[in-house]
Image (cartoon, rainbow, N blue to C red):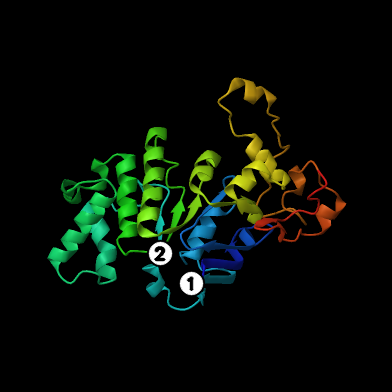
Amino acid sequence: MNRKLLEVQHLKQYFPVKGKAFHSNEIKAVDDVSFFINRGETLGLVGESGCGKTTIGRTILRLHEPTGGNILFDGTDVTKGNFLPYRKQMQIVFQDPYASLDPRMTVGDIIGEPIDIHHLAENKQQRKEMILSLLETVGLNSEHSNRYPHEFSGGQRQRVGIARALAVDPQFIVCDEPVSALDVSIQAQVVNMFEELQERMGLTYLFIAHDLSIVKHISDRIGVMYLGKLMELADSDTLYHNPIHPYTQALLSAIPVPDPQESRKKKRIVLQGDVPSPLHPPSGCRFRTRCPYATEMCAQEVPEWKEHEPGHYAACHRIGEF
């Protein structure tokens, strides 16, 4: 059996931009990104807003057609051709539980729709039983099936979104910031539920988030993105205790420490300037305009994405020099 469930090779996603005000005619939302996810693993993806995290998740599921590169699922290239057979294997939980559910459909019909599309139930009774079972799986009860999304809290709506994703018994789920719109107390419940479902059903996740502490808690490995490029990728503990890319070091230094004494000892790395526009990304290394270690070579050459230690990848000209 192939250990890698999903492999992304040199993925590119460019969006055309029209208008005289724009000198460039495309936004390079994702530019030459490669990684893989093993079966039963959670790969976390972090970075600032607009860095391309969500675009990667949507492109993997062909909600955006990729501009370039290849997407391999269980060894099969699914970049082109009919994707419908793979929709059953690959699902998504969207960020906003308010916008991702149809307000005119009952919860039962929302969860039942993928069952109908993929013809998973032989009759109405079996369909109903499947819907009620899915509601129970995500911590809701049978009475909720006849209600509409506006009658639920944010956390309950997100549970409905998760039940809809689970309806087709997928192998792989893109979790697109699934807890960022929820209260902190509810976030922990939803994250714990993701972990329980993974253990019970053998699921594989791409977990996209802003919150570095949540990503560390749920992820086996973590990738750090900046302006459409992967900067660093390593297993969770290695990335947090031995980051080798200056952007990762700056991100981790911003995590609040609850102990006041430890917090005073911690050195905060403050990056200068703002994130450049993806319409006009810097030449060479994307991060060089804010990097305290940037040299002339950083402006001229794109750093190579390579493995510096076993399982620890990064793209930087000066790794080991600072």
Q: Mark 1: which secondary structure?
A: loop
Q: Residue at x 72, y 38 (%)?
A: 273
Q: Are marks 2 and 1 in contact (CB under 8 Å)?
A: yes
Q: Is residue 299 left or right of residue 119?
A: right
Name the residue furthest bottom.
81
Total marks drawn?
2
Pinpoint residue 269: horizontal percent, then vertical percent: 71, 34
Amino acid found under the numbered disc labelled 2: Gln
Q: Which is nearer the eye, 30 or 33?
A: 33
Q: Which is nearer the eye, 286 or 119?
A: 119
Name the residue furthest top.
261
Q: Which is nearer the eye, 267 or 26?
A: 267
Q: Residue at x 34, y 52 (%)?
A: 162
Name the residue furthest right.
296
Q: Quadrant of residue 266?
A: top right
The numbered mark, 2 or 1, whose residue comes first in the sequence reads 1
Q: Mark 2: which secondary structure?
A: loop
Q: Quadrant of residue 230?
A: bottom right
Residue 30 visible in the shown view: yes
Pinpoint residue 250: horizontal percent, then vertical percent: 68, 39
Residue 101 visible in the shown view: no
Q: Note whether 68 is above or below 200 in the view shown.
A: below
Q: Is residue 270 left or right of residue 137?
A: right
Amino acid found under the numbered disc labelled 1: Asp
Figure quadrant of the C terminus:
top right
Circle 1 packing at 10 Å, graded few (<14), some (14-19), many (20+), is some
Q: Residue at x 69, y 25 (%)?
A: 265
Q: Which residue is mark 1?
A: 74
State how far apart marks 2 and 1 are (Cα): 10 Å
Q: Quadrant of residue 212?
A: top right
Q: Which residue is mark 2?
A: 171
Pinpoint residue 32: horizontal percent, then vertical percent: 65, 64
